[in-house]
């Protein structure tokens, strides 16, 4: 396939990823088209001038273009991808449990790409009929690839976090919506996940259902999985808040670029410096001025997050929790610093130790840059996608 369509104009981060992939694909000899979802009908007209039957593919994120948008359906509700026989490569950056309804009506030439190996196992188990591509982790972007990164000693922010916060109480209406027995059941799952942060939501869901019911048919278990997204969100935001709270209450000042942090419970809110929300390019600019970039994984237990590679590529020290996949590529104290969700009380000490030794931070940042630049940019991911499409995968 020489012509590739991408999407922009909806979820900003995913549009940014698409732009980086499109740029890399042009370097590999592909013609690309970015469909602007904020101007769908004007973009559709441009797309049909770009489209070449049998020589056009789609690379999208999180089912953009496959979510029932009317401008991608004909008068018989058939998708444009089926009507034009366009193969699609959908990179799903959230857990598949969020997308059962889309997976059940995926286009005929659909290819599912997971960013976490547990997500891929989930797809293999519950959607074996879906064509899956090999696991492909997220990647990072260096804002100024033709310039050296700013030395750690000259950077403005000690510790920075990019990301939003939502109070876990927001999701309690889903936990308590039935009766006391269900409420206790859901809180039991939440307590299990918080006490055992290496477990996945699907693992805990199955364990607790089997303990409660003894046996659950596979199709019923599949349905149950799709109804656990509020558990994932509750645990994700609880842990994100606790990590930031541990640092702030331990005397570490944290600059936060994101929404919702005014709701975090904290004994020392003066250590939380809440800044404006930023787009992807804005976040990268701030990373270029940051000594330590804090990452909290969004409950991906065998994958990565773009924040890790963005941090490394822009010369900051990445301070992150880990996963099975990250354990295989990161080296604590050499190219990053890793903290444990089971021992968050250690976080302030880790940050203090780093901030007290600029030379050590510089060595870690330099090693992190070399590691990420060698294999974790969007150009590297584009090369993999290129090979899949060229060989008709």
Image (cartoon, rainbow, N blue to C red):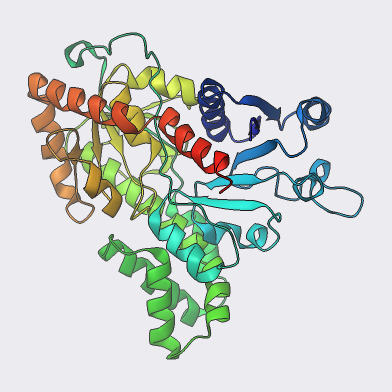
Residue drawn at point x = 15 percent, y = 27 percent: 364
The single residue placed furthest to the right in the displayed view is 75
Q: Is residue 256 left or right of residue 319?
A: right
Badge count:
0
Q: Is residue 227 visible?
A: no
Residue drawn at point x = 67 percent, y = 46 percent: 87
The single residue placed furthest to the bottom in the displayed view is 214
Residue 279 picture location, percent across and down:
51, 25
Q: Is residue 1 visible?
A: yes
Residue 146 sits above or below residue 7 on the image: above
Q: Is residue 321 left or right of residue 343?
A: right
Depth order, front residue of 145/172: 145
Depth order, front residue of 315/286: 315
Residue 31 picture location, percent across and down:
64, 24
Residue 102 picture location, percent across and down:
66, 57
Quadrant location of the N terminus? top right
Residue 152 sits above or below residue 38 on the image: above
Residue 239 picture location, percent across and down:
33, 51
Q: Quadrant of residue 204?
A: bottom left
Residue drawn at point x = 45 percent, y = 59 percent: 120
Q: Is residue 291 left or right of residue 48?
A: left
């Amino acid at each position: 396939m020489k012509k590739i369509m991408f999407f922009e104009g909806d979820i900003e981060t995913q549009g940014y990823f698409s732009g980086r992939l499109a740029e890399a694909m042009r370097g590999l000899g592909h013609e690309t088209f970015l469909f602007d979802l904020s101007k769908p009908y004007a973009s559709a007209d441009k797309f049909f001038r770009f489209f070449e039957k049998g020589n056009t593919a789609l690379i999208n994120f999180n089912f953009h273009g496959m979510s029932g948008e009317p401008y991608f359906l004909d008068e018989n509700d058939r998708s444009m991808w089926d009507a034009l026989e366009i193969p699609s490569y959908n990179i799903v950056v959230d857990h598949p449990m969020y997308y059962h309804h889309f997976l059940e009506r995926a286009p005929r030439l659909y290819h599912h790409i997971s960013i976490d190996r547990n997500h891929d196992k989930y797809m293999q188990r519950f959607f074996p009929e879906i064509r899956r591509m090999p696991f492909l982790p997220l990647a990072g972007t260096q804002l100024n690839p033709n310039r050296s990164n700013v030395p750690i000693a000259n950077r403005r922010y000690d510790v920075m976090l990019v990301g939003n916060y939502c109070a876990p109480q927001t999701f309690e209406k889903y936990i308590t919506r039935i009766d006391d027995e269900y409420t206790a059941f859901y809180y039991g799952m939440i307590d299990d996940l918080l006490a055992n942060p290496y477990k996945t939501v699907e693992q805990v869901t199955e364990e607790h259902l089997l303990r409660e019911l003894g046996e659950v048919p596979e199709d019923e278990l599949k349905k149950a999985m799709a109804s656990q997204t509020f558990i994932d969100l509750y645990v994700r935001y609880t842990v994100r808040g606790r990590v930031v709270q541990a640092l702030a209450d331990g005397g570490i000042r944290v600059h936060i670029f994101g929404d919702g942090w005014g709701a975090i419970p904290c004994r020392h809110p003066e250590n939380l410096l809440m800044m404006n929300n930023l787009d992807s390019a804005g976040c990268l600019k701030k990373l270029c001025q940051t000594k330590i970039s804090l990452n909290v994984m969004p409950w991906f237990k065998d994958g990565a997050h773009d924040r890790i590679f963005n941090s490394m590529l822009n010369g900051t020290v990445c301070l992150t929790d880990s996963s099975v996949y990250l354990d295989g590529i990161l080296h604590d104290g050499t190219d990053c610093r890793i903290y444990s969700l089971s021992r968050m009380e250690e976080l302030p000490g880790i940050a203090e130790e780093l901030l007290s030794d600029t030379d050590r931070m510089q060595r870690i940042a330099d090693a992190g840059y070399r590691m990420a630049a060698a294999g974790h940019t969007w150009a590297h991911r584009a090369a993999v996608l290129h090979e899949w499409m060229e060989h008709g995968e």
